[in-house]
Image (cartoon, rainbow, N blue to C red):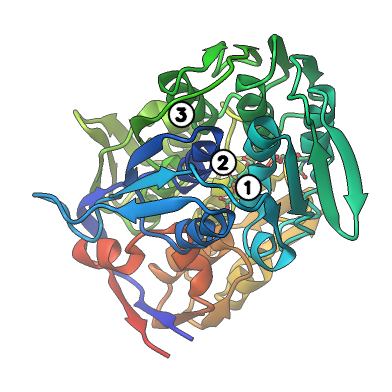
Amino acid sequence: MDRIRIRGGAPLNGLIPISGAKNAALPLMIASLLTEETLELGNVPRLADISSLLRIMSNFGVDHSIAGRRPGQTTETGQTIRLTAKNVIDTTAPYELVSTMRASFWVIAPLVARFGHARVSMPGGCAIGTRPVDLLIMALAKLGAAIEIEAGYVVATAPKGLRGAEIDFPKVTVGGTHVALMAATLAEGTTVIRNAAREPEVVDLAQCLVKMGARIQGAGTSEIVVEGVSRLHGTSHDVMPDRIETGTYAMAVAMTGGDLVLDNTKPEYLQAALDVLGQAGAEVTSTIGGIRIRRNGNGIQPVDITTDPFPGFPTDLQAQFMALMTRASGTSRIRETIFENRFMHVQELARLGARIRLDGDSAYVEGVPTLKGAPVMATDLRASVSLVIAGLVAEGETTINRVYHLDRGFEALEAKLARCGAQIERVRG
Ligand code: EPU
């Protein structure tokens, strides 16, 4: 298995191109199941999760092609993928495939909406928490799907099609909102989704669905209204920039010091995190195509945060921020309110010399003057990248094992960081 080896101490200077967002690309790819015509997606990141979803879609009978290189494209600029769900021969998503990536459960929505039948394995828990799908099932049931649980599978049927309904989510759920939105586009009549997730990825999906002929209003607010249509058509759409990748490199330069431009991204996608970085002592400014982050000599201030649905501080940046706080000049409190078990990085950061105390949903991080390199590993991708951030300042050598977690969500991570001065390399294993 590959490892990442880092020698800490070098500041980051230069420009990092931000990739297309994994968490936008996945639902967009799934949306191709809503039409028999071709959906062309640009700026799709080259990531293991994208390949996994392509395998699952191929299993249904979806044809896909990846466009060849275009002028200016490198292996770090996204790819263009065309998906055509014309001849869907199977509406079952088996456990072996769904268990590798939870988001693939979302295929249940377009399958039942367009074909009246879907049989999708329950995804099970994962390293960051139990992550149930009850609210996704509730949304489909409201839209008129008959739901049965059979031997670990959710079987959703709607032989006469789905019907518009009022869906009130008791809790904000990104996946639940994606599922309700996709299913409602082909339901008969009007659907109102209340307490909808406001994440930019929901807006990106809605914009693509509108280009496909869907009638959607309110995406990006907590109430989305969908007027169902009888069919959708193909279109072209570019995946939005990855706000979590953006925030990760912003935290990295706040940690190491230096001057970094994050290109092809938008500050408004991660304003809460940028505000916190400002309080921690980084200087954040907008550029024409993105964001510039600088930190010079003045140290890192402790800042308390609480994770929240968008526009709050994202849970997907919590681990990276904790890494930064391990070097702050004081104690910070980091509260995780989205996933109950998302502190797996704490023990590994401790191996590098961090002082962190866990108490319920909170981690108290007492900043230390130095971290020391060590072998570490992590159990999910955001936790893994927090160890990269810590490794970038740790004295000596840090080796991060189980790199496949990073490959699920960060395109060309070591190449992007190395070009900006980091001493980081992949060791093939
Ligand atoms: N929840 C339920 N029941 C449900 C669905 C969710 O109780 O039926 C709970 C979850 O257990 C959690 C909360 O609601 O406590 C929010 O979960 P949500 O549904 O919003 O998460 P998700 O859609 O499964 C997406 C991202 C995650 C990100 C979360 C929160 C993708 C592919 N995944 O997950 O990203 O952390 O939203 O923003 O978009 C990652 O990229 O590393 C990652 C985990």
Where residue 79 appears, x then y in whole percent?
29, 51
Q: What element carries label 2?
A: loop
For image coordinates 39% across by 68% down, the residue present is 393
- Residue 260 lies left or right of residue 101; in this view the side is left
- Say whether residue 182 is visible: yes
Q: Is mark 1 on a helix, strand or loop?
A: strand
Q: Mark 3 points at which residue?
A: 204
- Looking at the image, in which quadrant does ligand 1 appear? top right
Is residue 33 depicted above or below 67 in this figure? above
Mark sitting on residue 303: 2
For image coordinates 27% across by 61% down, the residue present is 416
Kind of residue at badge 2? Val
Which-is-in-front pick, marks 1 and 3? 3
State the count of labels.
3
Residue at mark 3 to residue at mark 2: CA–CA distance: 31 Å
Where residue 23 appears, x then y in whole percent?
51, 44
Whichever of callouts 2 and 1 sits on the residue coming sooner in the sequence is 2
Q: Name the residue under label 1.
A: 332
Q: How crowded is mark 2: few (under 14 residues within 10 Å), some or many (20 or more)?
A: many
Whether the residue under disc 3 has CB within 8 Å of ligand 1 = no
Kind of residue at badge 1? Ser
Where residue 12 appears, x then y in whole percent?
26, 58
Q: Do the residues labelled 2 and 1 touch (CB within 8 Å)?
A: yes
Name the foreground residue: 340 vs 71. Answer: 71
- Residue 339 lies left or right of residue 299; in this view the side is right
Kind of residue at badge 3? Asp
Whichever of callouts 3 and 2 sits on the residue coming sooner in the sequence is 3
- Residue 164 lies left or right of residue 9; in this view the side is right
